Image (cartoon, rainbow, N blue to C red):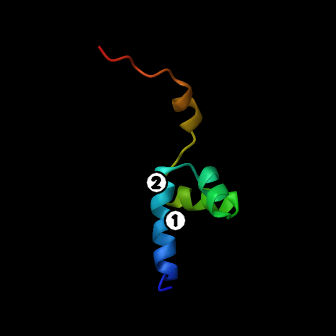
Amino acid sequence: MGITGTSRVAAFNELLREIPAPVLADLVGCHPRFAAERASALASDWADYAAIRARPSPTRP
């Protein structure tokens, strides 16, 4: 197919910047610990994700 390991790693890393590691791990079928370790290495910390989502949206004037 022409998809190299380097390409897969780059795509995985980019997705980790966009969505939380546990969600990505579930989507692609990898171990959540692996995704969390990669996210940590990339400094993509989603620890506050749930708290941010729980906050009400600011209202627009």
Badge 2 marks a residue whose secondary structure is helix
> Which residue occupies the foreground of this view, 45 or 61?
61
Q: Residues within 10 Å of mark 2 (few under 14, many from 20)?
A: some
The residue at the point 55 percent across, 56 percent down is 40
> Who comes first in sequence, dot 2 or dot 1?
1
Image spot of residue 33 (x, y percent) = 68, 59
Badge 1 marks a residue whose secondary structure is helix
Q: Which residue is mark 2?
A: 17
40 up-or-down from 5: above or below: above
What amino acid does circle 1 point to?
A: Phe
Image spot of residue 43 (x, y percent) = 48, 54
37 up-or-down from 46: above or below: below
Q: Which corner quadrant holds the C terminus? A: top left
Q: Residue 60 occupies which quadrant of the picture?
A: top left
Identity of the residue furthest to the front in this view: 1
What amino acid does circle 2 point to?
A: Arg
Identity of the residue furthest to the left in this view: 61
37 up-or-down from 10: above or below: above
Identity of the residue furthest to the bottom in this view: 2
From this viewpoint, is residue 48 visible?
no
Q: Which residue is mark 1?
A: 12
Image spot of residue 28 (x, y percent) = 62, 63
Q: Residue 34 occupies which quadrant of the picture?
A: bottom right
